[in-house]
Amino acid sequence: MERNGLERRFARAAATYDRAADVQAEVARALAARLGPGPYPRILEIGCGTGLYTQLLHDAFPDARIEAVDLADEMIRAARARLPAGGRVRFHRCDAEAAPPACGDGYDLVTSSGAFQWFRDPAAALRRYARLLRPGGRLAFATFGPGTLSELAEALQAVFGREVPIPARGFPGRPALHGMLEEAFARARVDRRRVTRRYPDVRTLLRRLKETGVTGPGGARVFLTRGRLECLEAAFRRRHGGVVAGYEVFYCDGWTR
C-alpha cells in the first residue's frame, strides 16, 4: 500500500473513525486480553490510530512506558486527546513499518491492532521488530485476513459479472503469516477468528468502511450508481438474507529467544 495514499485516507477518517470502528474495537479488546498480565515495562505500539488500543494498553499495564506511532498527524492528535497529558505514553509520527523508534535495551512488547495488513513488506517488518525486542520479548498483533468482506466481494461479482477487487484480497493469509513469523522469531502462533456484522443496507456498510479509512470496492475502477446499489443490496439479500459483513481476523504472536 502506497504510504502517502494510506496516510491521506486515515487522516481524513480521524474525525469519524471511533464512531464507525466497532469491529476494530472488538478486535483490540480481544488482542489486549490475549496479552495476559505481562509485565511489559517497555511497549511499542505500531499504528496507534485514534488511540483506541493505546488506551487499553495504558490501562492494562499501569507501570509500562508506551511508544505509540502512526503515519497520520490527525490520528495522533485524536489519540493524544484520549489519554492523560504528560503521562506514560509518547506519540511519534513516522512510518513504523520502515523506521520504528528503537529502545536502548529492547522492548518487552511490540504490538499492533489492525495495521499490519497495510504493510508493503510484512516479512521485512517482522524481522525489524524482532531486532527491537529484548531476549524473551514478544510481538503480538491482530490483522485482518483475505477473507474479510467476502460477502461484499461475492455481491459485487454478481452485479458486475466479474471479480471486483477489494483491499482485503491482498491481505496475507494464515500460512503466509505463520511462515513470516517462524522466519523472524524463535516461536510463533497464529489464531483465526471471524467477526460478523449485519447492516440495515448497503449504503450503511460502505459508509462504515469509508469512515474507518477503508477505500470502497474497486477503488476508482467501479462506479456504484443508484441502480447498481439496489442490485448489490438484492444480491446480499438473496445470498445472506440481508447485508452482512464478515471480518477474518488473525491474532499473531512471536517470541524472541
Image: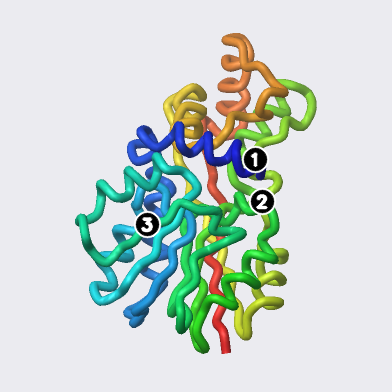
- Name the residue: 49% across, 66% down: 101
Q: Does residue 24 appear to the left or right of 6 in the view shown?
A: left
Residue 57 versus residue 238 in the image, above or below = below
Camera-side residue of 214 and 102: 102
Query: Residue 239: x, y in percent?
Result: 61, 32
Q: Residues within 10 Å of mark 3 (few under 14, many from 20)?
A: some
Q: Quadrant of the N terminus?
A: top right
Three-letter residue code for mark 1: Pro
Three-letter residue code for mark 2: Phe
Q: Nearer the viewer, mark 1 or mark 3?
A: 3
**Counting residues from the N terminus, which is met first, the one under dot 1 or under dot 3?**
3
The CA span between labels 2 and 1 is 7 Å
SS for callout 2? loop
Q: Residues within 10 Å of mark 2 (few under 14, many from 20)?
A: some
Query: Residue 171: which numbered mark, if any?
Result: 2
Residue 126 versus residue 117 in the image, above or below = below
The residue labelled by disc 1 is: 167
Q: Does residue 212 appear to the left or right of 96 in the view shown?
A: left
Asked if the residue at tag 3 contacts the one at tag 1, i.e. Cβ–Cβ closer than 8 Å, the answer is no
Q: Does residue 189 appear to the left or right of 134 in the view shown?
A: right
**Counting residues from the N terminus, which is met first, the one under dot 2 or under dot 3?**
3
Query: Residue 91: which numbered mark, if any?
Result: 3
Asked if the residue at tag 1 contacts the one at tag 2, i.e. Cβ–Cβ closer than 8 Å, the answer is yes
